[in-house]
Image (cartoon, grey):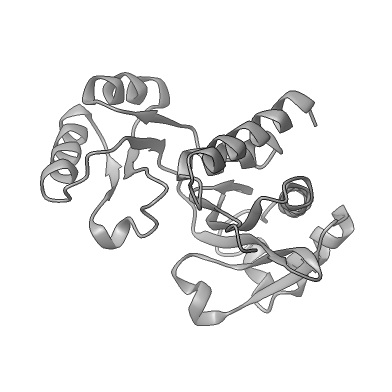
Amino acid sequence: MEKILVSEAARIIAAARARGQTALNEYDSKQVLAAYGIPVTREAMVGDLAAASAAAARIGWPLVLKACDHDITHKTERGLVQVGIANVDQLGAAWKRMRTEGGYDGDFLLQEMVKGAREMVLGLIRDPQMGPSVMFGIGGIFTEIFEDVVFRLAPLTLADGLAMTVEIRGAKVLESVRGLPAADRDALAAAAVALGQIGLDHDDIQEIDINPLIIAGSLPIAVDALVILKSDDR
């Protein structure tokens, strides 16, 4: 792992703390993950429609447009997410709607639209006594319904990460089913190991939520992520 990338993760976290934030926005959260080798969506932060159009040309259609602010964690419920944007006209319409109807005046995140039938969740929680623990399981809208997750204390080995992928009740979803290729369990294990390392390296992080972690083809990609920082009383 390149030290310069890990240092960039530390810089992002320190800057957020200096601004008094209790969480990172989605873009910064993914930058921290990417610094540790966790696959994330191709995306760009944009402040105006011209920049968004230029970023769209680089990333490619279709795209997802999201409000991106550390204070906004439930974007979908507020109508601040638009998926399946196929051209500049649709991008402009989505931008205008979120500015007017949504009342949002901050920067936007423009990201590639990742397709995959299988959605997992990967997370980290810091216990005051035990330290950081990594969670893996069924994600997306079914996370709270199925409650099918397993945990490991950090640091994790690749063997630990692989074991987590077979310990969930719905482990068969990662196999080759209904024409889908088997998920890359080695990549999932590596992501779990990396997430644990983030928790060990950065005491300022209280929680990390990667949901969904979409299996695109066979590879996992973090489509949405949230890093929550420790409050001063923790």
Query: Which residue appears at 49% of the width and 53% of the height?
Result: 116
In the visual, does 116 lie left or right of 74? right
Q: In front: 3, or 175?
A: 3
If the image is split into quadrants, where does the C terminus sit?
Answer: bottom right
Where residue 137 sits: x, y (%)? 64, 68
Pick out the residue farthest to the left: 100
Query: Which residue appears at 42% of the width and 37% of the height?
Result: 112
Q: In front: 139, or 78?
A: 78
Locate residue 61: give its quadrant: top left
Query: Which residue appears at 72% of the width and 51% of the height?
Result: 203
In the visual, does 151 lie left or right of 111? right
Question: Does residue 144 sit above or below 106 in this rendering?
Answer: below
Where residue 2 sits: x, y (%)? 78, 27
Query: Which residue appears at 54% of the width and 66% of the height?
Result: 139
Where residue 214 sits: x, y (%)? 54, 53
In the visual, does 90 lie left or right of 233? left
In the visual, does 24 lie left or right of 105? right
